[in-house]
Image: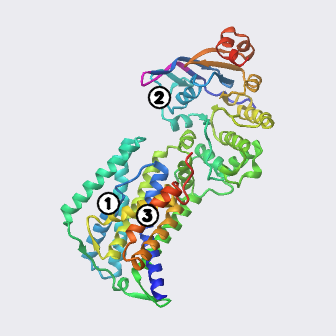
Amino acid sequence: MSAPTPPALHVDGIGLTIGGATILDGVDLHVEPGTKIGVIGPNGAGKTTLFNVISGVMRPTAGTVTLGGTDITRMSVPARARAGLGRTFQTSSYFPRLSVLENVRVAAQVSRGGNYSLLHFPRRDDPATEAAHAALHEVGLAHRADAMAGDISHGDKRKLEIATLLATDTRIVLLDEPMAGVGSGDVNGLVDRIRDLHDGGRRTVLMVEHHIDVLLGLVDKVAVMYSGSILAFDEPQRIMDDPVVQRAYLGTAA
Amino acid sequence: MSTLVLVLVTGVGLGALYFLVASGLSLIYGLMHVLNFAHGVFLTLGAFLGWEVASRIGATGWPAFLLSILVGGLVGTAFATVTELALIRPLYERHIEQVLVTVGLAFAAVALFEGIWGSDPIFITGPAWLDETTTLLGARIPNVYFVLMIAATALLASLVVFLRYTRYGMIIRAGVENRAMVTALGIDVKKSFTLVFAIGGSAAGVGGVLAAHYTGYVSAHLGQTLLIFAFIVTVIGGLGSLSGAAIASVLVAVLQQLANYYLGGTGDLIVVVALAVVLLVRPRGLLGRRPA
């Protein structure tokens, strides 16, 4: 079955100035539907800020963000989410004192309605619970469904974040360091989960990640950020060979 | 022995009254990070209007008492809802301004109440049974304490069922834990803010009517006096933790009654000392979350 393509994400001339300091400066990024994009760059380059602007957490002082041709620059965070834009946060993207199942259920019920129902009890067999169970099964967390999310291992928390997005109708997901703090043994598993999320192009995936080696093997294109701008946006191999990129960023690691 | 029982049971009853106020404070702080200094005036207006209704249809009868509780709850709900929509919502995410506006509303409302009902306490009556006593282990306990306990238990039970088992409750719990993520999932938490204010307001309004029967009078300052203790209870229990507030309500009130009886009326002092100790030793409170 051919999956419908996600809407295209266009970032045009995004600038953000806070108190005289320029955080983002003329960022252009045209993301083709269904691709996997990596965003790299040194700390303070503006990677997370760019995600914040795209997801609506921060308002840019210049430029536009369009999703499927619609200008979403002024749209609220929840409205963007309902338009299909999902994200995780670098710090924490889960609810520690809800069970693992409840974490995913909260996400699943958004797209299925009935959020604000005072009298509807989440039943064992309703569609949102079923979707939550399916998502947990997919990431291999089914056996932890009843555990408190705050009590599971760090690697499992990362899987839970993926399951949360899997249970939603999101078409574009922004992952802010999905592998941060994960042991090398768990990285491969997590890469597979990100592929699940991409779902053969049903979702566009953008990710900020410091595991460069892993990232280069996973994504279709890499955007290199430096000091609030995009220095280069190309296929991984050409990024690696780009002398400007090497000098500005990769060179520091060599 | 019977004195100790009396002190303990009245302590629990007073704790129940604290919880009727503190539950709303705790929910509101937990979800919205707003310290609502106007919470006491929700209570006071509930008490005044509850009394206005009861006194017109025969204050000593049960129908008047029950109707006044209903009126108190509705008035508290309405007042809190309007406050959230008109004052808190326009200041979304501006926590200092939100707190200041509740402080201002509290001052204005108390002045308004004094303008309408005067600055002297209005002594009220209720069903005779409330003033009678029931003997428990040799102690003669005024019945109003049992009413307070029943009301607080019912409130706690319904809040727990609501938060734990309904979809909306799950969203509120998720919002308390991680508001950024709930929003990123597409949930507009602002809707929950109004609801949480409404729930807190209704509990405060009912608490106002019961507080009036507990103290025997209504005054413009009734709510704000209780609010101080409710804040202390909320902080000791752990800001934002409902069960923490419930436990701390009972602990603080029992401690207060014990000190009042055995340590020469030093109850209020002991409560403040307890607050200071908690803030020094365990600043997040009994069941509060570790700062992230």
Between the residue at mark 3 and the residue at mark 2, the CA separation in whole angstroms equals 46 Å
Q: Which mark is residue B41?
A: 1
The answer for which chain carries disc 3 is B
Q: Looking at the image, which residue is at 45% across and 48% down?
A: B33
**Callout 1 touching callout 3 (CB < 8 Å):** no
Q: Residue at x 52, y 38 (%)?
A: A78
Judge whether A34 appears above or below A250 on screen: below
Label 1 vs label 3, nearer the camera: 3
What's under tag 1, amino acid-wise? Val
Q: Residues within 10 Å of mark 2 (few under 14, many from 20)?
A: many
Extent of the magenta region: A11-20
State how far apart marks 1 and 2 are (Cα): 37 Å
Please indicate whether residue B40 sits to the left or right of residue A10 in the image.
left
Asked if the residue at tag 2 contacts the one at tag 1, i.e. Cβ–Cβ closer than 8 Å, the answer is no
Q: Nearer the viewer, residue A207 or B37?
A: B37
Which residue bears the numbered disc 3? Answer: B273
Q: What's the mark number on residue A59?
A: 2
Q: Chain of mark 1?
A: B
Residue B289, image x, y percentages: 56, 52
Going by the numbered disc 3, the residue's amino acid type is Val
